Amino acid sequence: MNGPYDDIIHLPHPTSKKHPRMSMEERAAQFSPFAALTGFGGVIQETGRLTDRRVELGESDRAELERTLNFLDSQEEEHPLVQVTYFLPDARKEGGSYVTVTGHLKRIDQVGGVLLLQKSSPIPIRDMLHIEAIPFLSEEI
């Protein structure tokens, strides 16, 4: 089957000696000032960002958390080293992420409902998933 372009269809793409070839990104950028939905790219990117759902603790997990908090409350003056995993709500969309921090216990504010670590932001007790005391290792081992 002979078509009107059979003589040129398999020739290499012409390349200018004066102008280097543009990348696909550079070619697409030529048209960005004419984008009909300016700023929509950021919205799409934010919508695609994943967040975690808050886990609701079962009765036994809440009781264990409460026992650990009571124990740590009794050890408050010793400023034990603890590791806390808690839910941090996302500022821009529904959901959030689970964060784990390690620090020395400053105090447990039962009235305010927060756990205070040295050199850390207050952690709401209602957002806590897990807490554990980390034993100190002796330098002489």
Image (cartoon, rainbow, N blue to C red):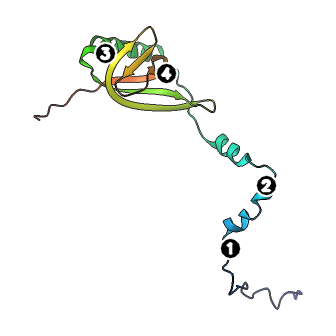
Mark 2 → mark 3, Cα distance in angstroms: 57 Å
Q: Residue at x 34, y 16 (%)?
A: 107
Please give the residue where the numbered disc 4 appears in the rendered image. 127
Badge number at residue 72:
3
Mark 4: which secondary structure? helix
Give the mark toward the camera: 2 or 3: 2
Packing grade of label 2 (10 A; few <14, some 14-19, many >=20) is few
N-terminal label among 1 and 4: 1
Mark 1: which secondary structure? loop
Mark 2 → mark 1, Cα distance in angstroms: 20 Å
The quarter of the picture where the C terminus appears is top left
Q: Amino acid at mark 2?
A: Ala
Q: Amino acid at mark 3?
A: Leu
Q: Are marks 2 and 1 in contact (CB under 8 Å)?
A: no
Residue farthest along the bottom direction in this orientation: 7
Q: Residue at x 57, y 31 (%)?
A: 90
Q: Is residue 46 above or below residue 110?
A: below
Please give the residue where the numbered disc 2 appears in the rendered image. 35
Given residues 120 and 3, the one toward you in this image is 120
N-terminal label among 1 and 3: 1
Mark 4 → mark 2, Cα distance in angstroms: 42 Å
Badge number at residue 22:
1
Mark 4 → mark 3, Cα distance in angstroms: 17 Å
Q: Is residue 42 above or below residue 23?
A: above
Give the mark toward the camera: 1 or 4: 1
Packing grade of label 3 (10 A; few <14, some 14-19, many >=20) is many
Mark 1 → mark 4, Cα distance in angstroms: 52 Å
